[in-house]
Image (spheres, rainbow, N blue to C red):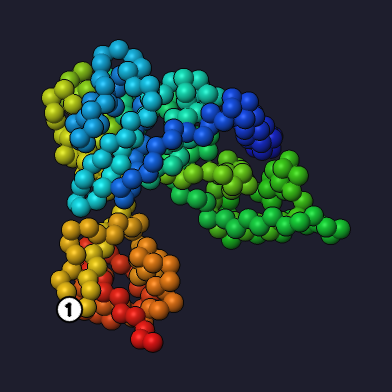
Amino acid sequence: VHIGRLKGPLARIKTELLDGASRGSGGVGDGFDVRKSGDVRCALVGFPSVGKSSFLSRVTETKSEAANYEFTTLTCIPGKLVHKGTEIQILDLPGIIEGAAEGKGRGRQVISTARTADLVIIMLDAASGEAQRRKIEYELESVGIRLNMRPPNITFKKKPSCTSNIVNYTSTIKLNNGLSDTMVKEILKDYKIFNADVIIREDITVDEFIDVIEGNRRYMPCLYLYNKLDTITMEEMNRLSQIPHSVVCSLKWDLNIEEVIEEIWEHLNMIRIFTKKHGARPDFVKPFVVKRNADVEHICNRIHQDLKTKFKYALIWGTSAKYNGQRAGISHVLEDEDVLQIVLKTA
């Protein structure tokens, strides 16, 4: 219980130190100035000389300098991969080193740029992948990036202090990971929060509750890419390939690259929506690429901000429709490769 109570002050002090370091170094935490292009963005992160530049050159038309010595890439190099009609921007970030979260080796810029991506690809040397993976995860988690996690199912509402301050605490399930009514109030007290509503709907840890209070966490999908299969045994290759969110490849042997591209697409969790005008064939050349579970309203907003007010109904062809040309409302949830026609109100 005592350790749990210390976690709040430690997290708060760490955030203050990192913010101070960022300001003191002239805003190094702003990231590399790379214009976002394409439909989605992936950040390629890894230690020096794991093969990031070679991978970018292999899957995109960009030539990123590659060599057998460390720190070949000194700035952020963008490349474009076109897969299933989707333009995927891949950023080859300079090699990360231990202490990156504190700003070593342009680490703060690397991590800040990674936060702008839709997917983090952590490239690892298969021979020393486990050790590299732990170190990179630590650096990313230190600055609030949560890999392959979803935000905790909690309602946290901070209210202005008044004469009758109270923390209204409710838990809808039994908590077994150290969190309790007393612990929540102690942690909030460390953050000088005395008036708040807290509703906990899942069995979370103290650290996860602190993430909610901090409010600046970035929950991101992550794919672990193990390169240099030529340096390990078949047994080790099979073991690595079965780790969740992991894929193996060899750029030297040009092995399993297509599978890597497919895994990137799966982890992005995107769907393609084709549109059609009345009396015309669908536009199968350039789809709208949106997050899975997007609805018709999302596409309306992508086309034009005023379209929603003029919306009458939609016609849907595809797997989300019960029959071809189904009439649907603005909240209809779309599925991959659906064809959408929007019918507007007439004046």
Residue 28 shown left or right of residue 294 in the figure? right
Q: Position of residue 55 (x, y in %)?
A: 23, 29
Left or right of 9 on screen, residue 124: left
Which residue occupies 63% across, 25% down? Answer: 24
Residue at screen point 30% across, 67% down:
334
Q: Residue furthest front?
A: 347
**Which quadrant of the rendered structure holds the C terminus?**
bottom left
- Residue 16 is drawn in which quadrant? top right
Which quadrant would the N terminus be assigned to in this image? top right
The quarter of the picture where residue 186 lies is: top right
Q: Nearer the viewer, residue 281 or 206?
A: 281
**Which residue is drawn at the image coordinates 58% and 51% (left, top)?**
175
Graded by Cα atoms within 10 Å as few (under 14), some (14 to 19) or many (20 or more), the crowding at tag 1 reads few
Reply above or below: 210 against 111. below
Is residue 77 something one can see in this rendering?
Answer: yes
Q: Is residue 139 visible?
A: no
Residue lying at the far bottom of the rendered structure:
347
- Residue 327's place in the image compared with 332, above or below, is below
Residue found at the very far top of the displayed protein = 69
**Spot occupied by residue 64 in the image (x, y as percentages of width and height):** 26, 26
Q: Residue at (49%, 44%) from the top-left corner?
A: 218
Residue in the foreground of this view, choosing between 301 and 124: 301
Front one among 291 and 88: 88
Q: Residue 319: x and y, percent?
A: 22, 69
* Element on which disc 1 rests: loop
Q: Amino acid at mark 1?
A: Gly
Where on the picture, by quarter, is residue 296?
Answer: bottom left
Q: Nearer the viewer, residue 31 or 269?
A: 31
- Residue 23: x and y, percent? 62, 30
Position of 194 relative to 251 (above/below): below
Residue at the spot of label 1: 279
